[in-house]
Image: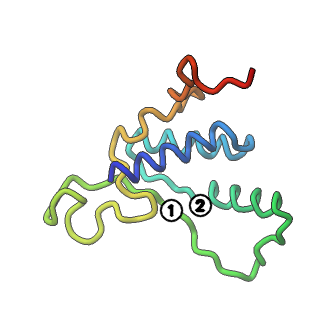
Amino acid sequence: ARRIRDAVEAALSDIILLGTEEQVRLARHAAGELVAGRTVHTHDLVVSLRDFIREALDLDPIPADLAVPRQGPARPSGSGGRGGREGGGQGGGRGGGGGMGAGGGAGLGVGGYTDDTPASGGHSHI
């Protein structure tokens, strides 16, 4: 669950850093929902990213008649339960990006700043 949360945090941080204005707004909203421990719906963000990438690669848009399943939500994990640590029985936190517990994503830089500043002696282009 922690690896999934870390991967989602890293992806959202990258989008906040490199995304379009719309993508940054959607990613910041998702980060805030993760921090609050609420269900995070990622469909609009995924669609925005997909459309941007398809346009950048000069690919045709996805046909309107093609049914693409909605993306998300990333679900907060349950609190143990019957099946052990990973959310109990069959369902706990196994959806897209599951395992986001309350407080997950606390280092996301929801205020617009991340803790990803390079250390001194890091990458220099001089």
Local secondary structure at mark 2: helix
Q: Position of residue 17 (x, y in %)?
A: 65, 36
Using a 10 Å C-alpha cutoff, classify the residue at mark 1 as few (fewer than 14 neighbours), some (14 to 19) or many (20 or more).
some
- Give above or below for 112 relative to 16: above
- Give above or below for 19 relative to 118: below
Residue 101 as seen in the image, left or right of residue 113 = left
- Residue placed under numbered mark 2 in the picture: 43
Local secondary structure at mark 1: loop
Q: In the current view of this chain or complex, which residue is farthest to the top?
A: 120
Q: Quadrant of residue 57?
A: bottom right
* Residue at x-position 63% and y-position 44%: 15
In contact (CB < 8 Å): disc 1 and disc 2: yes
Q: In the current view of this chain or complex, which residue is farthest to the bottom?
A: 65
What amino acid is at disc 2? His
Q: How many marks?
A: 2
* Residue at x-position 37% and y-position 51%: 3
Quick one: 66 or 15, which is closer to the camera? 15
* Residue at x-position 48% and y-position 60%: 73
Colouring rule applied to residues: rainbow
Using a 10 Å C-alpha cutoff, classify the residue at mark 2 as few (fewer than 14 neighbours), some (14 to 19) or many (20 or more).
some
Q: Position of residue 115 (x, y in %)?
A: 50, 27
Q: Position of residue 21 (x, y in %)?
A: 74, 40
In the picture, the disc for residue 72 is 1
Q: Earlier in the sequence, mark 1 or mark 2?
A: 2
Residue 68 as seen in the image, left or right of residue 114 = right
Quick one: 118 or 38, which is closer to the camera? 118
If the image is split into quadrants, where does the C terminus sit? top right
What amino acid is at disc 1? Gly
Quick one: 93 or 17, which is closer to the camera? 17
Disc 1 and disc 2: Cα gap in Å?
Answer: 6 Å
In the picture, the disc for residue 59 is none
